[in-house]
Amino acid sequence: MTTFLETCWIPPPPSSAAAAAAELQLPLTFFDIVWIHFHPIRRLLFYKYSCSESHFLETLVPNLKQSLSLTLKHYLPVAGNLLYPLNTADKKPLLRYISGDSVSLKIAVSGGNFDELVGNHPRDADQFYDFVPEIPPATEDSDYKIVPVFALQVTLFPGQGICIGFSNLHSLGDARSIVGFMRAWASTCKLAGESELSPPVFDRSVINDPLRIDDIFWKAMGKIPFTPSSFALPTNRVRATFILHQSDIKKLKEMVLAKKPGLGHVSSFVVTASYIWTTLVKSADHVEEEEEEDQSMLECFVFAVDIRERVNPAVPTNYFGNCLSAGIAEIEHGKLVGEEGLSVAAEYMAEDIKNRINNKDEVLRGVENWMDGSKNHTWARAVGVSGSPRFDLCDADFGWGRARKLEVVSIDGERCSISLCKSNDSEGGLEVGLSMPKERMDAFAAVFADGLKS
């Protein structure tokens, strides 16, 4: 159904001074080292755009290649590699670009049903992997494993649309960084010239680390064997999207504040995350009725938070790399599935954001203990979030308009994780993406719809 036409390697323009530089090396900060063994982040952007195969190959593909090369001039690490030391006791990992490095780009044509793929209903998760690029295999020299950090694939659905798939190592950068790169590429492509967006900052000295947390983290992470990640197929899952309209979010806020008036204000993110979390736990109970859950067991919800502007001194907003902390809510199972589960979850999240995440003196307190293993039992049951409405990937316009749909394929590889972004179908609404076995998805859909009726 999908035919691969070309695999090419796109370098920065050889004429640019930066690309011609002998070498660029960036040490990994403790924010990067945390993610070094995490699976690649895999995303798909679907654009509704009627186009023939000949126009695609003769006009669009050359423009995409040229604009990608121009963009890489400002984002050299994207074309580079992660160097992972073979002797982890003597050396630390780093990102390196050397002249001649490039990004893998695959060009494909698909006979698939574009409208089916961009629907919200449950769809077989396996079919999306035709459009996801695998990060090329690692090589080795005498000191390091040399691991590509980024890969791209552009797939045409003739007369229907275009899909841009991209995969990156999380240790390369967080959502703000990758979205910045994709928007810069899109802008360069649309303008047929240099992007007008602010260039990225790579200077690692902006990350304040007087306690040498990077050494503490590397001591723990360096003991774990580095293994390349591949697609775990079949997934035995379906993907579906659930929309919370602005009116739904308003209703959820009112429900929370009726129970917890002392909160005063509760954000759209908090009520959305709380509603999805409680719905996931309740619907899991419906599927696993024969296995009575321990009501005192702790359930956990974890969400990444960009802290560039939340630390002291602040990190530039266009810093390229990772700069994340985690928001955490831990609640007993019985409370979460009870009548006041939504308001209890919202209170926990809102208080953590107010007292810790938004407090420059608290947001990184105890960071040296992130790797001590004390939370491993809790993480095993955690629900996580990928993406944020703050970083709007669908706004990356290559000249074909706003993306019709974002799919975060990498949540397939996690026990329970959701994707979150702005809704394309509902002004002021949010889109929640889920990947689960069909029985679980059906149970979730029923509880989700029922909860919004009350």
Image (spheres, helix red, strand yellow):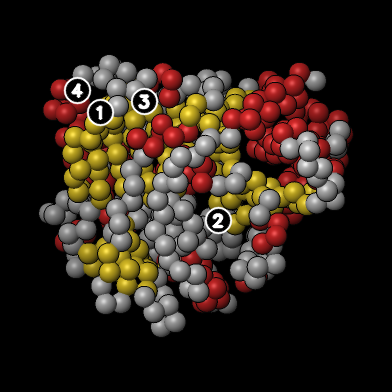
Tell me the residue that label 2 is attached to: 324
Q: Name the residue under label 3.
A: 47
x then y, percent, for residue 331: 79, 49
Q: How far apart are marks 3 and 2 (CA)?
A: 29 Å
Check disc 1 and give the amino acid type: Val
Q: Real-space Cα distance between discs 1 and 2?
A: 37 Å
Q: Which residue is drawn at 20% across and 26% down?
A: 56
Reading the chain from its start, which is encountered first: label 3 or label 4?
A: 3
Query: Within 10 angstroms of label 3, few (less than 14), some, or many (20 or more) residues?
Result: many
Q: Distance between the residues labelled 3 and 4?
A: 15 Å
Q: Which of marks 4 and 2 is in front?
A: 4
Q: Which amino acid does label 4 sit on?
A: Glu
Nearer to us of marks 1 and 2 is 1
Q: Is mark 3 on a helix, strand or loop?
A: strand
Alpha carbon distance from label 4 to label 2: 41 Å
Residue sitting nearer the eye, 86 or 309 = 86
Q: Decide which of tag 3 and tag 2 comes sooner along the chain.
A: 3
Mark before the other along the chain sequence, 1 or 3: 3
Q: Is residue 160 visible?
A: yes
> Which mark lies nearer to you, 3 or 2?
3
Q: Mark 1 points at which residue?
A: 109
Work out whether mark 4 precedes mark 2 in sequence or the reverse, and give the earlier one.
Answer: 4
Q: Is residue 177 above or below residue 312?
A: above
* Disc sitting over residue 53 in the figure: 4
Q: Which residue is found at the position 80% from the left and 45% from the top?
A: 293
Q: Residues at badges 1 and 4 in contact (C-beta under 8 Å)?
A: yes
Answer with mark 1 or mark 2, whichever residue precedes in sequence. Answer: 1
439 left or right, relative to 231: right
Kind of residue at badge 2:
Leu
Amino acid of disc 3: Tyr
